Image (cartoon, helix red, strand yellow):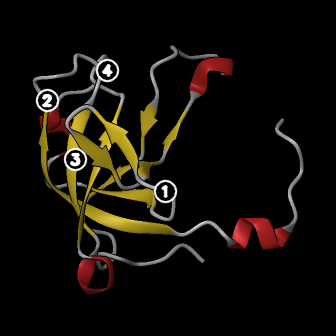
Amino acid sequence: MKPTIAFPDWMKMDIRLGTIVEASNPEWSNKLIELHVDFGAELGERTIFTAMREFKSPEDFAGKQALFLVNLPPKKMGESESQGMILALDPANADSNSEPVMLLFDNIAPNGSQMA
């Protein structure tokens, strides 16, 4: 288990639902998938990279909704920058394979919905 955090620290995280409108493999990386995510009117569309290419293809993401941490500072990745992080489960310590489990949904709520 990770160290305990105070509730105000949890409240600092801005977790939003977004629709992945496009996903592709950037030519400059063999590990990353580039996602273009619609977060609705307030946040607009953002580019977010995920290191899931070993396990997933762009087709697995396109048109799906997922939860993203959107208030991380932008991070330079190759020729672009990532403007957030997709949330996934890491079953490495569970009784299953070590492939991350993607939390992908079919239109469960409006884009930009915030985790409460």
Which residue occupies 61% across, 66% down? 13
Residue in the foreground of this view, choosing between 60 and 47? 47
Mark 1: which secondary structure? Answer: loop
Q: CA distance from mark 4 to mark 1?
A: 26 Å
Counting residues from the start of the chain, the first of labels 3 and 1 encountered is 3
Mark 3 crowd level (few <14, some 14–19, many ≥20, 10 Å Cα): many
Counting residues from the start of the chain, the first of labels 3 and 2 encountered is 2
User: Which quadrant: the N terminus?
Assistant: top right
Q: Identify the amino acid type marked 1.
A: Pro
The answer to whether the residue labelled 2 contacts the one labelled 1, judged by CB atoms less than 8 Å apart, is no
Relative horizontal placement of residue 24, taking residue 31 as reference (left or right): left
- Mark 3 or 1: in front is 1
Q: Identify the amino acid type marked 2.
A: Asn
Give the labeled residue for mark 4.
55
Counting residues from the start of the chain, the first of labels 2 and 4 encountered is 2
Vertical order, 64 against 26 (above or below): below
Give the labeled residue for mark 2.
25
Vertical order, 62 against 115 (above or below): above
- Mark 2 or 1: in front is 1
Q: Identify the amino acid type marked 3.
A: Leu
Which residue occupies 73% across, 66% down? 10
Give the labeled residue for mark 3.
35
Give the labeled residue for mark 1.
73
Residue in the foreground of this view, choosing between 5 and 94? 5
The answer to whether the residue labelled 4 contacts the one labelled 1, judged by CB atoms less than 8 Å apart, is no
Q: CA distance from mark 3 to mark 1?
A: 17 Å
Query: On residue 81, which mark appears?
Result: none
Which residue occupies 31% across, 36% down? 77
